[in-house]
Structures are given as C-alpha cells and as structure tokens.
Amino acid sequence: MSKTMNKATAGYHMLMILSAVDGKFNGQEDIIIKKFLEENFGDLSNLDNELAIISALKSEDYPVHFNNAMNQFYLDSNKGERNHFLDMATRLIAADKEISARENLFINELYKAWTEEIED
C-alpha cells in the first residue's frame, strides 16, 4: 500500500492483522480493538474503507502490510503512545490465552523495531 497512514489508522491495521494471523477471532480481541478505536478515532466514517483494505489482504501479504503500518505508527507517535500500543497489542494476542507462533513473530517484530523505546 503506497498511501501513507496516520497513527490511528496504522494502529488499527496492526491490531486487525494481529487478530487475524492465528486464524481465530474472539470477543476479548474485539474489546481491545474497540478500546483502541475509542481512544484514537473521533470520526469512524473511514473505518469501512480501512476494514475493506485489511479484508482484501491475503495472509501472505500480512508481514509487509504490518511492517508498513508499524513504520507509519512510529513516525507519527511518541514514546508513550508506542509503549501504550505495545501493551494493547500484547494483550490482544494473549486474549484467547494462547499465543500462536505467527502471533509471536508479529509481536516480536514490533518489539525489535521499538527496542530503544522499551529500554529507555
């Protein structure tokens, strides 16, 4: 995707991908995503467009799209926002009490990319 995403949109894309990579979606994941939306989206009018973009992705396209969203979020956020997002993302993948190998790969990408932020 060549279009630049803002922080809220990039975060939404990452959370939706994290919720999809294990092939299961549960109510607790939905609650975490809704909390993120409430905190970051004042106007939900473009959410349908974003969901259409995410839904059109093939599973094999998730890593590149996730990485693009991760980089966009980083550029448009501060350390506190990134740490808060990492907490939400970690809670999301653990919501079903089971972290799949693929979920672990994606969350590790976030932690690796933002390691300096965590260590400060």
Image (spheres, rainbow, N blue to C red):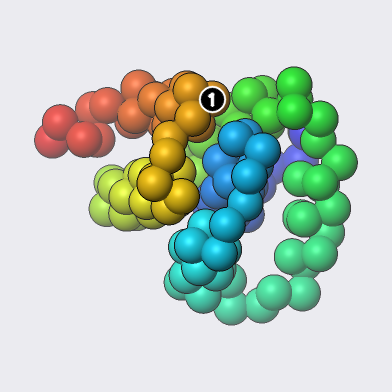
In the rendered structure, the answer to whether residue 103 lies left or right of residue 113 reads right
Q: Quadrant of the N terminus?
A: top right
Q: Quarter-wise, where is residue 119 in the image?
A: top left
Q: Secondary structure at mark 1?
A: helix
Which residue is at 24% across, 35% downward? 117
In the rendered structure, the answer to whether residue 119 lies left or right of residue 110 reads left
Q: Amino acid at mark 1?
A: Arg
Q: Quadrant of the C terminus?
A: top left
Q: Residue 88: where, in percent of width, then height?
A: 39, 53
Which residue is at 63% across, 24% downward? 63
Q: Quarter-wise, where is residue 69 in the image?
A: top right
Q: Residue 83: where, in percent of width, then height?
A: 29, 47
Q: Is residue 61 above or below residue 5?
A: above
Residue sitting nearer the eye, 78 or 68:
68
Q: Is residue 46 above or below residue 14?
A: below
Pointer 1 residue: 102
